[in-house]
Amino acid sequence: MDINILNRFINDKCSDLEKKEVEAWLKNPENDLLIKEWMSKYWDAENSIELGVSSEPDLNRIRSIIQERISLEKDSDSDSNKKAILTSFQKRRIFRFSAAAAIIFVIISSASYLFFEKGFLKVGTAKNDKILLNNAKDIAPPSGNNATLTLSYGEKVNLDSTKNGVLAKQGNVNVSKNANGEIIYSGHAADAITYNTLSLPKGSKPFRLVLADGTLVWLNAASSVTFPTAFKGHERRVKITGEAYFEVAKNAAMPFYVAHDDAQVRVLGTHFDVNTYDDEKDMKVTLLEGIVNVSKGALSIKLSPGQQAKLTTDNISLLQTIDIEEVMAWKNGKFFFKGTDLKTIMRQIEKYYNVEVVFKEDVNYQFYAKIDRQKNLSEFLKKLELTNLVHFTIENNKVIVTK
């Protein structure tokens, strides 16, 4: 689809023939991804969320911002077929985009929302942004890591309550806690290799660990990593549960392996994220820098930066274009959702705030939002409630979800 025709269509300046061409293109379900790409590119989720709530959204202002971005794109992009650009704000019109679309996509703004419902693009306004708290105080974000280090002889060290300095000696290796709260391993391997495990429960901030070879590991809530106190031999191996981000120290003579069950990631020196949460449908490996090889049983695939491997029970698939900011939001202090279904969002809430989520009704929406992780739980949920498509009640340590 020629982007110039789309721009004329947006501004109600296209011919009848062009209008029919655009409408036919919009109804083709194969073009849904391009519409989603526009939604992420031409809607600044972070700014619009933080604007605050007003009684009446300034649709003219929103429309002019989007139109300005469209103009800039037209001037700077010589390849007019790269992206399709659409907006529903022009005269509050309703555009058909896919006869096959059945679920709702939501973009959250301060007092307005944009969503797709049964193939139509609509604009609405939020009527109520008050989260209901029943017999409970609000739930604050985690204040600490709650990390536990299990040493080779079974002793467990609560890292939040320990002082800085050397915590333990494992063979010829010192285990220390620095002023930033990080755990650092230093020394060299003894004859016998010993292993430690770092564990984070639900309700934890991410935790950073420095392995004996200089590799950096960030661990997410409800996750663990098991690793040798020092590396010896021809390879470096660690095991994880949950989610971890690695910046592996380069050592061509000792490949680095991250294992989970029968899947593993092999690298020499690179940056990547591994998500193995049991309550997620698939295991995911996302590469930020370098090259990695992902394998599961007899299956194997190689990743380049910006790609993601998705591992199911009997297959590995390659996703070519991944939003790294979305994948790494947990490490960078953000919740970031780009067409994420509500159940996936609430699983993140359960892990981060250490709450139980109960769905009283089936809520089949997909949200686009960027929210700071330092928000109280009610503030987070209030952002989603702005759509008036979902509502929440906090009862003690439980979140009730209704329409």
Image: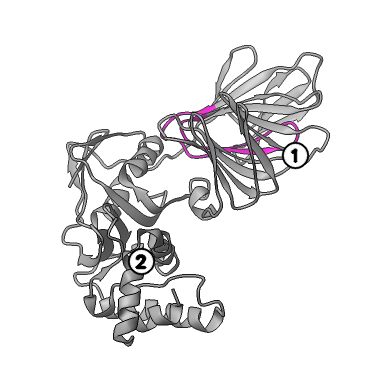
- Which residues fall within the magenta stretch? 199-223
* In this view, the mark in front (1 or 2): 1
Q: Please name the residue that numbered disc 2 is placed on.
A: 48
Q: Which secondary structure, mark 1? A: loop
Q: Residue at horizontal 58%, vertical 24%? A: 262
Give amino acid for label 2: Ser
Query: From this viewpoint, is residue 19 visible?
Result: yes
Instruction: Residue at 27%, 42% (x, y): give it.
Output: 138
In the picture, measured across the screen, residue 313 lies left or right of residue 111, that is right
In the depicted structure, whether residue 388 falls above or below residue 251: below
Q: Is residue 116 left or right of residue 218?
A: left
Residue at coordinates 43% horizontally, 71% vertically from top-left? 84
Q: Amino acid at mark 1?
A: Leu
Q: Disc 1 marks which residue? A: 268
Q: Is residue 212 magenta?
A: yes
Residue 326 location (% of width, % of height): 48, 52
**Near-viewer residue (38 or 44):** 38
